[in-house]
Image (cartoon, coloured by chain):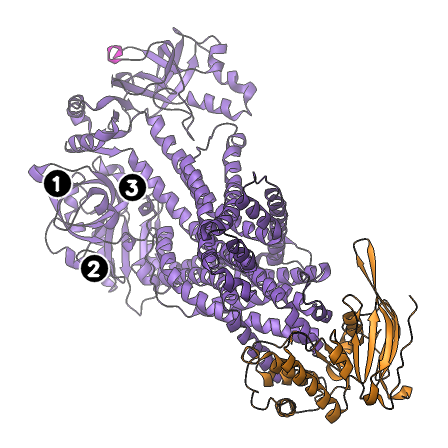
Chain colours: A orange, B purple
Amino acid sequence: MAENHAVLRTEDLRKDFRTGEVIVHALRGVTMTVSRGEFLAISGPSGSGKSTLLGLIGGLDTPSSGRVFIDGVDITHLSESALTRIRNEKIGFVFQSFNLIPTLTALENVALPIQFARQRRFDPRRRAREILTLLGLGDRVNHRPAQLSGGEQQRVAIARALANNPPLLLADEPTGNLDTVSSQVVLEALHNVRESTGTTIIVVTHAPHIAAQADRRIILVDGCIAEDALNGAVAQGLQPTSEQAHP
Amino acid sequence: MIERLRFAFAYALRNIVRDRRRAAFTLLSVAVGVASVVALRALGLMLTDALTSNAQAFLRGDLRVTDTGMDGGFVMSIFNSQERSHPFSAENIPAIEAWAAERNIAITFTLNGELMQVAVIGEYGRAGPPALTMSVFVDPAVYPFYDTIRADKPARALLGDLFTTPNAAVLSQRLASQIGAEVGDQVRVGSANVYFTVTGIVPDTAESSLASPQNLLFSFIYLNRAEQSLFGLDDLADRAYLKLPPEVNPQAVEDEIANWPRRSDRQRYSHWSTVSASEVLEENVEIADAISRFVLVLSLVGLVIGGVGIINTMVVAINRRSLEIAVLKTLGLHSLDISLLVLAEAALAGFFGSLLGAVLGMLLSYVARDLGQQAFAIGLPWRPYLDPILIGTALGLVVTLFFSLLPMITAARVRPKLVLREDDVPMLRAGALWTIISFIVLIVGFGLLIDLIVGSYRFARYLRLPPPLTPGITATLGTFIFLAVLFALNWVLVWLLSKLPSFRNANLQLAIRGLATHRTRTAFSLLALIIGMTALSGTLIMTRSINILLYTSISQPLGGNVVILPLSLVQGTVRSRLDSIPAVNGYREIRFPGRLELEAIDGVRDYERWFALARDDAQSSMRRASLNLVLGVNTYGNPPRGQLVAGRFIGPEDAGQAVITIPYLPELEAHGVTIGSQITLRIGGRVQDFEVVGIVAPGPSTGLIPFSLNDSALQVPLDMMPRQNIPFDFVIVDVQPEAVREVMAAVGAIPGVFIFDVAIFDSIISRLMNQMAALPLLVAGLSLFAASALIATTVALATMERRRQIAILKAIGVSRWQALGQLLAENSLVGIAGGVISLLPTLLILALVPALTEGIVHMPLPTDLVILMLALAVLVTIAATLITAWPAATEKPLNALRYE
C-alpha cells in the first residue's frame, strides 16, 4: 500500500510511565502504517500496551518520544485545541463500556460531535438519524442509554464515533462487555461501516475470533509489535507495514 | 453559539434531574445563603418602611417641640415633681395654644418623663407586687396626630376609644405582663390617691424607643393628661406636637417657635428644640440605609458558607462524572465547551437554589421581623417584598457562579485519556495556578459586591488603599486569608484526629479512617461549623456574661435585693413593716451626701499623694476614688456586710456620735491610719472630725463597680449626715429570695413609698442585652443553619461515596445501627472538635478582660451555656448525619453493590 494512502503512521512510538521510583516502558518503539479503509486488529496480553497505543494514536495522550501522523498531519506536537479538532473531525472513538451520556437520547448522543464541530458539515439530527438507521437502530433513536441493550448501546457509540465521518475509527475492546450474539452484531456493524463509508477501523481486542475477522492483525507483547500479519483472503492487496521494535 | 448554549442548559438540566440528591445539596447550599440574604434584606426594608414611609406618623406630628436637655429625662413623680422644671406649664401653655389657634395649627402636649410605680389591686384592696414604668400623659382625643395606636386587648381598639371613662389607664404589653394585669383590672399608679382601670393593653412598639429612648429601659403606661392633677402634675408637659395646615411652611413655624414664651424660671438656661418631619425623615433614611447595608453584608456570611457547599458538591459531582467529561473531550468538545456545561449547571443550580432560598427567606423574614422589633423596639410591617427576592436571587446566582469557578476549571482540565483508565480514575485537580486564579476572581468579585452593597466609595479615600484594592476587596481578602489559615489549622486537626487510637474498636477504626480519607472536605465542614458556632456561642456567652457582670455590679454592691425610697414621713412605718416580716434578714437606711469632701486624714490634707506612686495603677486609682464615697448609714438586723478587719461596725447606738468606719486600703494602713484615727469631712460648709471605729475589707469582686455600699464606703451614723438635695433616705433590704414579692406587696402598699426589686436591673439589663444581641443572633443563627446544611451535604457525599463500603459491611454482618454508629462516631468527633474550637475565641476574650482592665473587671463564665453550646455543636452534626446517612444505612446491601 502506498505511503500517501496511509491514514495513520507512527514512528518509533514510545511511552514511559513513572510509578513511584519505577519507570514502566508501556511502548518501546512502535512503527506502523495503516492504510485508508483498512480494518486492523491490535491484540496482545494484558499490559502489553494496546490501550496506550490507542490513546497515542487518538491524540488522547502524548508519547514520550516518536511521532503519530493522522492523514499526514503530525499530531504529537499539536496544541490541545488543535488536538481537540483532530479528535472531532478525524477520529471516532468506541469504548468497551460504551460511555454514552446517560442523560441524552441515542439521537442526541450521536448528534453531539456534530454540534460541537468547529466547521459543521452535517445537520446534526438528520445525520444522527441516518447513521443510526444504517446501524439498524432507526426505531431506537429516542431511547436513552439505560433503555437500550448492551449491543444497541455499543452500536449507538459506533454511530456517535462516525458522526463527523472521520477517516479513522478507534475501538477499544468494543465487544468486551457484550454477549456473543451482541458481539457479532457489533462486529457486523463495524464491517458494514467500513464497506459503506471506507472508514479505517482499528480495534483493540483480546478476542482471537475478532482479530481473525480483521484484514490485518498486530500482536503487541511488552510494548513491542511481536507480530504483524494479514488475515487470509480478506487481505488481498494489503501488506503488513510495521517494523519490529527494538527495546 | 445559541445552539451550544441550548445544549449546555439542556444537558445541565438533565444532569440535575439525573443526580437529584447531589443537586439537592447544591440547591440547599445556595438556598441557605440566599435565604439569609432575603431575610435580612427584608428586615432592612421593613425598617426602612417603618422609619421612612411616614415621617409624620413616626414623629406623630409635623413638628415636635421639646426643651433642650429635657427630652428623655425622667423623675420619680411620687417625690417632689417640682424638682424637674417642666418646660410647659400653666404659665406658658395658654399663650402657646393661643399662638397656635391664630395660625390654625393643631397642638397637643404630652408629659413623658415621669417614672411611676404601678401595681394591680387584688382582692380586699391588696396591691400586688409593683413595677416601675414610664408615664405617657396624652390627650387621647387627638394623640397621635398622624399615627394610629391600636390595642392588642381589646383587639384593634383605638387609643382614643380606650379613654372614654375617668381614671382609665392603657398599659404596654410588657407592663401588663410584669404586674399580671388584664383589661378591667384596677391598678394603683404612682402617687395618685384613686385607682385606675385598665381599659386596654397596647403593643410595646406603640411608643418607639427611637423617639423615646427611656422606653429601652422601662415599660410605659398611657394616662389621660386631663387627669394629671391626680398626680400633682397639673398642666405640666414636656413635649408639644404640632400639626400644620398644608399651606404653612414648617421652617417659618420653627423660627417662630424660637420665640415661644418660656417659664419664668427657665429663661436663662434653655431654649426650644424643634424636630420636623422632614428632619426625622432625613435622619431615618440615613439610619435605615446604614442598617440595611450592614445587615445585607452580614447576610453574605451565609452565602460564603453556602458557597463552600457549592464548591464541595460540584467538585464531587465532577469527579463522579470525570469519565463522562473525558468522553465528551474525545468527541471533540473543547475545554471551553466543558466549562460552559459546568457553568450552565451552576447557573441552573444558582437559579433554582435562589428561588428556593427566596421562599425560605420570606418565611425566615417573619422570624427576622420579631428579632428586628426586639433590636430596634419599633413596630415593623411585614409584607412579601419583591426587592429582597430579586437581590437574593441575583446575589445567589452571582455567588454560585463565583464559587463554581473552581469546579469549572477542574472540569475543563479533565484529560481525555481518562477514558482509557476507566478503573483507575484519579482525583481531579484544578492545579495550583488555576486554583489561585479562581480564588483571585472569587475575592475580587465578592469584594466588589461588598463595595456595591456598602457603598464603600464614600469612605474609600480615607483608607488610602493602593489600587486595585478597594475596601470590599481588602476586607474579603483579609477574611479569606483568615479563613485559609483557619482551614489549614482545621486540616491539621482533622489529620491529628485521624491518628487517634481506635482501641481495636472496629467502628471507631472505620470512623477514624473515614476522617482520614476526606481530610479536605471534613476540614471544610469543620470550618463552616466553627464559623456558625463561634458566631452563635460568642453572641450568647458574651451577652450572658455581660448580663451577669452588670447585674452583679449593681446588686452586689447594694448589699440587698429590694430598694425602698420612702418619703421621710412614712420612714417609721416602713421600718415597722420590715421589722414585722420574718423573711427580712436585715436592712440599711442610707443617706447620700450632697456636697461633701474628705478634708484630711489624721490631719494630713494631701493624703492623695499616698496613692501618687501608683498613679498609673488603675486599681490604686480606684482605691483612692473610693475615699470620695461617704454615706450616712443606719443598719438594722443582719444584712450582708464586708469583712471586719479591725474595730466594729456602726450601729444604732452610734446615733449622734462623730464616728466613722473606713474601707481597708493598704495605702492607709501604710500611713498608720487605724482605729482611733481622725477623718476630717467638710459637709455642706461645716468641717467635722470623725473617729475611726472600724476598718472593713472589701468583699469579693463586685464586677464593674470596685466598691460596695456595705464595705467599701466611708460610713457615718445616718443622723450625722445632713439631708441635702435628696428628700428621702434609701432603704436597702436583704430579703430571702422567695419572700421578695411579699415584701414588695407589704411595703408597696404604704402610700408615698417607692419600692423595687433589684431584679428589675436584671430584667432591664437582660432586655438591653437582648436588644443588642438580637441582630448578631439572627446572623449567627443563619450562619449555623448554613453550616448545618454544609455538614449535611458533606456527610451525604461521604455516605454516597461509601455506599459500597456500607453495603460490604452489611454483607459481612454489620447491623444498620453499627453502620450508622460508625458515621455518627466520625461526625461526632468533628462536632466536638468544632464545638471546642468555636468556644475558644469567646473564652479567650473572657480570660483577657481582667488583664486588659488591670484586674478591675472579671467577666463571669456561664458554664451551663458553654456546655450547652458544646452539646449544640455535637447535636448539629449528629442531626445532619442522621438525616443524610439514615437512608444509606438502611439500604439493602445488594442494591448498593449492584448500583455501584
Residue B204 percent location from the top left of the image: 28, 52
Q: Position of residue B212 (x, y in %)?
A: 32, 49
- Does residue B251 appear in this view? no
Disc 2 and disc 3 in contact, CB within 8 angstroms: no
Q: Is residue B449 magenta?
A: no
For label 1, the crowd category at 10 Å Cα-Cα, with few meaning under 14, some 14 to 19 and many 20 or more, is: many
Residue at the disc numbered 3: B74
* Cα–Cα gap, marks 2 and 1: 30 Å
Q: Which amino acid does label 1 sit on?
A: Ile
Q: Nearer the viewer, residue B759 or B188?
A: B759
Q: Mark 3 lies on which chain?
A: B
Q: Do labels 2 and 1 share a chain?
A: yes
Q: How far apart are marks 1 and 3 (CA)?
A: 25 Å
Q: Name the residue under label 1.
A: B121
Tag nearer the camera, 2 or 1: 1
Q: Outermost residue, left direction?
A: B124
- Furthest-top residue in this view: B676
In the rendered structure, which amino acid carries the disc numbered 2?
Val
Labels 1 and 3 positioned on one and the same chain: yes
A155 vs B864, left or right, is right
Spatial CA distance of label 2 from label 3 is 24 Å
**Chain to which the residue tagged by mark 2 belongs:** B
Viewer-closest of B319 and B658? B319
Would residue B244 be found to the left or right of residue A117 on screen?
Answer: left
Residue to which mark 2 is pinned? B142
At mark 3, the secondary structure is: loop
Q: Give the extent of the magenta segment.
A: B651-656
